[in-house]
């Protein structure tokens, strides 16, 4: 049994978390106040707390009981918590402790890709799979692209580089508000993708999301730094 009163969430005592979880089990709406409360208390701007981990078994149970909910906050919250690197204990320990829950949710997450069609929803579903399968660095870095911006750090000079969507293409720029002189990102070939990227690309293809698969090849491609002219792959700059 979990002694919730002795645990802390992001803001303080976790005593209310069990009641919130039970109330959330009957809601699939992201904007429901109970889910907004749980996100704030268990995962806030990438940070987690001891209560976040204690909530994982119940979140996994909720997600497993409603596999046909396309965009389920319980599954996404679970995935966000286990992919966080800003909280105790070490992430490897968390994955070991909750290995059964993670394994049970992999097919649930995979199934979501059959239920979504909008590109942003497909990408969020992919990030959930990446989190459960620990596909670094994409378990944390796929959430930017649906919002049309990715911030990187050039491995050579250390300056910030922004990837912006311009006319359906990704361009690298110094200023996210000025893409006039942006450098187009060179798409990678499917056969050259490293294992994590290949896994996500193959998932898109196998679930009929060819347009997103093509977009991923650009996201996983080669960037020319607008500052120092060095060329690098996006994964090396967001790890």
Image: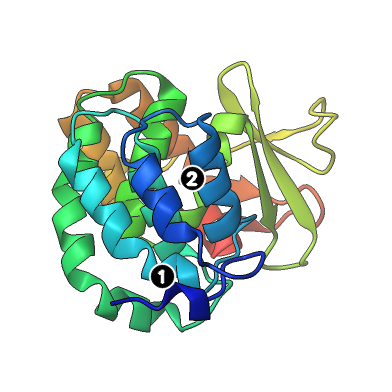
Quadrant housing residue 231:
bottom right
Residue 108's disc is none
Question: How far is mark 1 from mark 2, CA to CA?
Answer: 22 Å
Mark 1 or 2, nearer chain start: 1
Q: What is the quadrant of the C terminus in the image? A: bottom right
Q: Position of residue 104 (x, y in %)?
A: 14, 57
Q: How many marks?
A: 2
Of 178 and 181, the residue lying toward us = 178
Q: Secondary structure at mark 2?
A: loop
Quadrant housing residue 184:
top right
Left or right: where 178 falls relative to 24: right
Left or right: where 56 falls relative to 185: left
Q: How is the image coloured?
A: rainbow
Name which residue lies at 46% across and 46% down: 220
Of 46 and 176, the residue lying toward us = 46
Q: Position of residue 205 (x, y in %)?
A: 21, 31
Q: Position of residue 155 (x, y in %)?
A: 66, 67
Q: In this rendering, is residue 91 above or below 74?
A: below
Other-residue count near label 2 (Cα within 10 Å), few / some / many at <14 / 14–19 / ≥20: many
In this rendering, which labeled residue sits more in front, label 1 or label 2?
1
Residue 142's disc is 2
Residue under circle 1? 53
Q: Position of residue 31 (x, y in %)?
A: 53, 29
């Amino acid at each position: 049994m979990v002694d919730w009163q002795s645990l802390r969430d992001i803001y303080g005592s976790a005593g209310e978390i069990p009641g919130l979880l039970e109330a959330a089990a009957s809601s699939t709406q992201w904007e429901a106040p109970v889910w907004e409360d749980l996100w704030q208390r268990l995962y806030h701007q990438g940070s987690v707390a001891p209560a976040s981990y204690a909530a994982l078994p119940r979140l996994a149970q909720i997600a497993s009981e409603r596999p046909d909910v396309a965009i389920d906050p319980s599954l996404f919250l679970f995935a966000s918590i286990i992919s966080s690197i800003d909280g105790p204990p070490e992430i490897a320990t968390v994955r070991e402790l909750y290995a059964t829950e993670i394994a049970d949710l992999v097919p649930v997450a995979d199934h979501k890709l059959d239920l979504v069609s909008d590109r942003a929803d497909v990408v969020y579903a992919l990030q959930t799979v990446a989190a459960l399968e620990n596909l670094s660095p994409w378990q944390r870095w796929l959430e930017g692209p649906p919002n049309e911006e990715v911030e990187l750090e050039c491995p050579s000079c250390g300056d910030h580089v922004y990837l912006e969507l311009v006319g359906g293409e990704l361009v690298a720029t110094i200023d996210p508000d000025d893409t006039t002189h942006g450098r187009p990102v060179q798409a990678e070939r499917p056969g050259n993708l490293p294992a994590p990227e290949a896994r996500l690309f193959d998932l898109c293809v196998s679930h009929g999301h060819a347009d997103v698969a093509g977009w991923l090849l650009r996201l996983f491609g080669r960037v020319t730094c607008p500052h120092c002219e060095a060329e690098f792959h996006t994964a090396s700059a967001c790890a």
